[in-house]
Image (cartoon, helix red, strand yellow):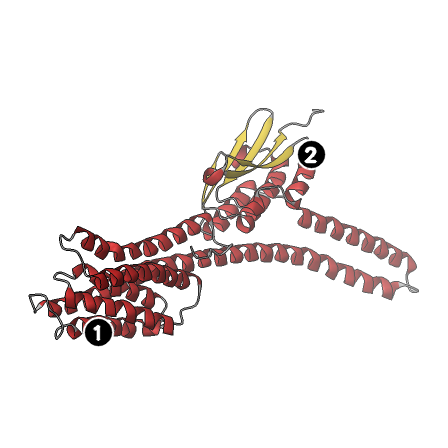
């Protein structure tokens, strides 16, 4: 089977496998002439028997190789190998038309190879290549007219049309299958781009918040510094007062910056949930929220908001999720929020540094955060959950 790129998700790998096998399995239609010879009451000619067996093996092997190349490499055909393979099986097809009373099943040989050749042809030349192969298969049938020794003589003309139809049908069937695969790959790439844009937008939002805070404080510090500098030697008492204010401004700037970096700003949990649903939705992830965020006590809103942001980022960066459930549960003693997503990959099966940081923050309020894999195999999900007491222990 052709190589599957490591960035493909579980569903994409399944579709890739299905596409490969559906194309490669058609190769075994080339063995139908064997069955026809085996069911014939008359003993087949040795030359016909040997060429039919050889052609069947060649078609199975070469079509499988052509399918492999078409799904894993650039399309650069038709190559010399393609032309020689098609010429060989077409010659066998023409020979069968000349010596077999009903050579219909031999028409599979050029059709199957033609489909594999067209798959490896660049898009701009596929139509011309298909028509050329169809003419070649029909020409082999017509070339058998002078040497055909089996009645009725008119069969080569019918077989010419049949061979052309088989070439056209297999080319169309194979191209349709690969076109569907290419469309899904393009959609997956669009999904990845949407994920990257969603993360970039979140980073820009964070950068804008940081810029607003730092810009305001730095501007004030600069003005206070200039004023203090001008007052030195003129009004030392006023200069000392402004210097003290300058120190307080710097301390406030540090505090506000820490709050931005560590997510300690006043946060509406409902807004964080709405942002998470929007970001995940942009990445093609079906997201559902269960529970009322307003039930979470105000002192815990910021903390759980950080949990939602961290979980959303992890899903976008480290999973191939198609669905995410966010569950909010609050009772008389504890508030809990869980994010559960499918599409887990080895890179997100364990806790990262972000989860470790969250755990430390939750611990200061008597809570905890846990990231774990539930289930195994294709049904496994990743759960990021955090809980904290709704009342402080000393209350």
Please tell me which residue lies in front, 239 or 128. 128
x, y (%) of residue 226? 82, 65
Residue drawn 37% across the image and 57% down it: 181
Image position of 325 (left or right of 92): right
x, y (%) of residue 390? 62, 29
Q: Nearer the viewer, mark 2 or mark 1?
A: 1
Total labels drawn: 2
Give how far apart the Cα atoms at labels 2 and 1 are.
Answer: 76 Å
Secondary structure state at the residue bearing disc 1: helix
Question: Label 2 belongs to which residue?
Answer: 363
Secondary structure state at the residue bearing disc 2: helix
Please tell me which residue lies in front, 175 or 113. 113
Residue 110 to residue 337: above or below: below
Looking at the rendered image, the quarter that the N terminus falls into is bottom left
Please tell me which residue lies in front, 256 or 389. 389
Looking at the rendered image, the quarter that the C terminus falls into is top right
Residue 29 to residue 292: above or below: below
- Res. 2 image quadrant: bottom left
Classify 10 Å Cα crowding around label 2: few (below 14), some (14-19), many (20 and above).
some
For the question of whether residue 194 can be seen, the reply is yes
Classify 10 Å Cα crowding around label 1: few (below 14), some (14-19), many (20 and above).
some
x, y (%) of residue 43? 17, 56
Please tell me which residue lies in front, 378 or 95. 95
x, y (%) of residue 378? 46, 40
Q: Earlier in the sequence, mark 2 or mark 1?
A: 1
Residue drawn 11% across the image and 68% down it: 149
For the question of whether residue 265 can be seen, the reply is no
Image position of 102 (left or right of 277): left
Question: Label 1 belongs to which residue?
Answer: 135
């Amino acid at each position: 089977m052709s190589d599957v790129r490591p960035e493909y998700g579980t569903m994409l790998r399944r579709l890739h496998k299905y596409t490969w096998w559906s194309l490669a399995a058609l190769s075994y239609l080339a063995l139908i002439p064997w069955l026809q010879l085996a069911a014939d009451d008359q003993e087949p000619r040795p030359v016909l028997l040997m060429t039919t067996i050889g052609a069947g093996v060649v078609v199975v092997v070469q079509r499988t190789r052509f399918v492999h190349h078409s799904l894993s490499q650039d399309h650069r055909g038709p190559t010399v190998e393609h032309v020689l393979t098609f010429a060989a099986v077409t010659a066998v097809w023409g020979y069968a038309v000349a010596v077999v009373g009903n050579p219909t099943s031999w028409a599979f040989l050029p059709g199957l190879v033609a489909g594999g050749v067209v798959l490896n042809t660049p898009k701009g030349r596929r139509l011309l290549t298909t028509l050329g192969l169809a003419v070649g298969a029909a020409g082999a049938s017509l070339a058998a007219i002078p040497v055909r020794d089996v009645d009725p003589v008119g069969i080569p003309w019918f077989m010419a049309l049949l061979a052309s139809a088989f070439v056209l049908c297999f080319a169309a069937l194979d191209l349709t299958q690969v076109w569907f695969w290419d469309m899904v790959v393009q959609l997956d790439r669009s999904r990845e781009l949407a994920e990257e844009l969603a993360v970039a937008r979140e980073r820009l939002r964070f950068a804008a918040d940081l810029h607003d805070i730092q810009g305001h404080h730095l501007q004030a510090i600069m003005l206070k510094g200039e004023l203090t500098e001008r007052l030195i030697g003129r009004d030392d008492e006023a200069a000392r007062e402004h210097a003290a204010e300058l120190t307080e401004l710097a301390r406030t700037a540090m505090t506000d910056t820490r709050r931005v970096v560590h997510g300690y700003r006043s946060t509406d949990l409902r807004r964080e949930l709405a942002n998470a649903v929007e970001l995940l939705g942009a990445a093609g992830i079906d997201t559902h929220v269960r529970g009322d965020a307003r039930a979470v006590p105000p002192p815990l809103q910021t903390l759980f908001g950080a949990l939602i942001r961290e979980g959303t980022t992890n899903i976008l960066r480290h999973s191939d999720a198609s669905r995410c459930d966010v569950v909010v549960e609050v009772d008389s003693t504890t508030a809990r929020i869980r994010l559960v997503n499918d599409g887990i990959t080895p890179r997100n099966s364990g806790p990262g540094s972000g989860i470790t940081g969250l755990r430390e923050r939750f611990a200061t309020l008597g809570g905890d955060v846990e990231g774990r894999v539930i289930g195994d195999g294709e049904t496994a999900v990743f759960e990021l959950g955090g809980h904290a007491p709704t009342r402080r222990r000393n209350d």
